[in-house]
Image (tube, rainbow, N blue to C red):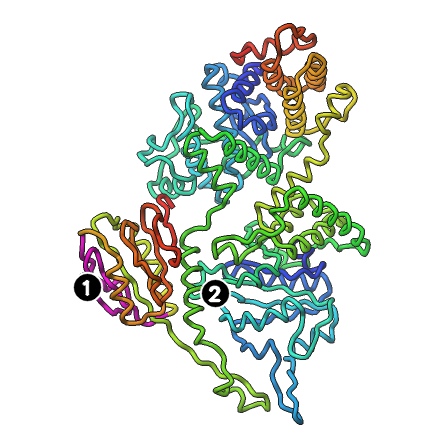
Amino acid sequence: MEEKVRAARIKATYMYPYLSTALLTVTIHESTDVQTMAITQGGRIYWNPDFVATLTMDELTAVIVHEIWHMLRLHGERAPEDESLKGIYNIAGDCEIDDSLDGLPKDAIYPETFGLQGHLTVEEYFEQLVKNAVKIQCAGVASGDCGSGARGGKDKCDKDDKASTKVLTRLDKELIARHTAEQIRAIGNVPENIARWADALLNPKVPWERELRSKFMSCVSRALGKTDYTYARRSRRASVTRAILPGMVSYKPKVAVVMDTSGSMENKQLSRCLVEIKDLLRALADRVTVYVTDAAIHSVNTVSSIGEIKLAGGGGTDMRIGIQEAEKCKPDIIVVLSDFLTPWPTHKPRPEVIGVCISGEVTGAPGWMKTIQINEGN
Amino acid sequence: MEELAIAVQMRIPTILWGSPGVGKTQSIYQLGRALGLHTEVIIASIHDPSDFSGLPIPDDHQVWYAPPDWAKRLAEAKHGLAFFDELSVCPPSVQAALLRPVLEGVVGSLKLPDTVARVAAANPPEEAAGGWNLTPPMANRFCHFDWTVNSESWISGFLSDWPDPAIKRVPDTVGADIVAAKALVASFIRVRPSLLFNFPKDEASQARAWCSPRTWEFASKLLGACNSVGSSEELSVALIAGCVGNGAAHEFWTWQKSLDLPQPEEVLKDPKGWDFPDRDDKVFAVISSTVAYACSKMSPKMWEKAWAVIERTVKEKRPDIAAVCARQLSKAGKKGYPLPDGIESLLPILKMAGRL
């Protein structure tokens, strides 16, 4: 039986050459402590001989590759600490992996098994599964137990991890994952899911919320050259010391938001983005003027909370009109929320302009505008 | 805590990123006690710029900049630890005034002794509405750590009333290790010069660790310290990543690990005698690169030698690795090359895997 597992592992290196290092670094051990196959955090694969006997060579290969992906995606380390949630996390991890893996036994777990949409990350699957209170009642490969390498914590098999000198540390696994990602990038031509994993590992993406805040704050600080300490006005503290202390002058930025309500805009993302901006404005500006625009301006409102605005529109797109109108009131910052399917002004407006691309691609945006892409699926 | 202890002992300015309430200040006091340092906590966000640049006091036709009390206490204590909390909530003008105390230890007209360690803490800007990003020059003068809550260590500290942590002291002989670490970093930069200076494009990453000559110097000092206290690989990489960023740190570490591996020429020269690595990832790296090298310079002699390497791999009880590499090698064979002996043992498993 061990021959069979080892042969399947070799076969896997033919099918997925980029996984060779990972496949050959893990060690394989027979054990009846596991029902099917499991991987520990230390990178040891345990297999049950009865289970292996029921599988074809192709299925066995796919199951081994499945366990390898638990390791490469560091599921064991990312799992919640809470014991009662580990089973669900394991299933979320299974969904993430099986999404792009062929040849698994027929009772394997897929996102569709739970009526979920595919191509999400393990964290997103987990969130949805918890929300739907999924009962873990699956059999076979889908027992929801792929070992501590998939769900964290300690398993029966982990005691062998301690005894062995050949365990992989988190760093080892990270280095192997990096190496694998580099191979994937060199090869290309892999399922989109896997290409995305490699890309995210090698070029970690800053979440758009953080990017939006950073860009916004850097515009604000430029506009706020005016908020600062000044010796032109003495600090009130100075009355109690002999020291000359500066007082403070402050200035609140004027912010204009040009909101694209053309037919091509997606509402869900627009509202998520509004929530972020609302937060920022609450901290910084008392009032903000909102220009609801598609191919014409529908309304101009000066509000203290963005939630007060009525959205209207649905026609074509021309953000130039909104920006032009906004400029007349001399704001410090203009934030444009749009899908970028619009013509742009040919000259840089006086205020700083931040373009938030709600959906689609940031293409054709002029160089003077700071742009942020809000990606689908995150 | 361990990484912070090393950075503090090496007097590398350090910044902790973490949500409010995760026990940063608590840990700083603990660390200060354990290392015997006089600790001062300064909440930066409630201060004026003048508190850090010194209060200007006119005195007979000149102005001197009076340092505040905490700076005086630190200067008197000599071995001290200054902790600047809530850095990201300060307006840029306060941040600018903080540059000198944090980075050079100068407060007003007072220069703190070099033996005073400086640590800062900040909330990630996405958590504090209205928080300011660190300016890139400021960010690049720190070693960055993410501070998170770990339930296990919290429970043990909570139950035992926060005992002083066991801290590994950096020995006085660290100088030699730093020299060695510098040499290592220098040869890495020679191979990857583009990583010497790598200014990130997006503004959020600019506020964190990124590669520059300064941060590589920090990294080499910390690596030297890690080597002299014998800390784990994880810790060394975490400290390097704190200075130059995650990607560069991992690349550096992969590179320095590969230095220990035998080169293909050596292996082919003496297939039976070279030092066989103990770990499977290393074995695979060596054997597969040796086979790739042999395939690129194929000749009857090379063919024979390469098979001897595969045979050795079988003998060292790595039949799977041997089988994977044997397939690669056999594809490069030409007509008339003799079928090597010693691979019969691989045939059954190769057959089972379905390819030969």
Residue type marked 1:
Ser
| Residue B313 can be seen in this image | yes
Residue B16 highlighted magenta (yes or no): no
In what element is the residue under mark 1?
strand
Name the residue beneath numbered marker 2. Answer: B132
- Which x, y percent locates residue B136? 54, 61
Q: Is residue B70 above or below residue A84?
A: below
The label nearer to you, 2 versus 1, is: 1
Q: Residue furthest front?
A: A346
Most foreground residue, B99 or B194: B194
| Residue A148 can be seen in this image | no
- Which x, y percent locates residue A208? 41, 52
Side of B300 relative to B323 (left or right): right
- Which x, y percent locates residue B118? 65, 65
Q: Is residue B271 above or below residue B63?
A: above
Side of A83 relative to A355 (left or right): right
In what element is the residue under mark 2?
loop
- Residue displayed at 52% across by 75% down: B46
Most foreground residue, A250 or A371: A371
- Locate residue A369: give its quadrant: bottom left
Name the residue beneath numbered marker 1. Answer: A299
- What span is colored magenta in the figure? A285-314
Side of A338 relative to A234 (left or right): left
Most foreground residue, A209 or A227: A227
- Residue displayed at 59% across by 9% down: B348
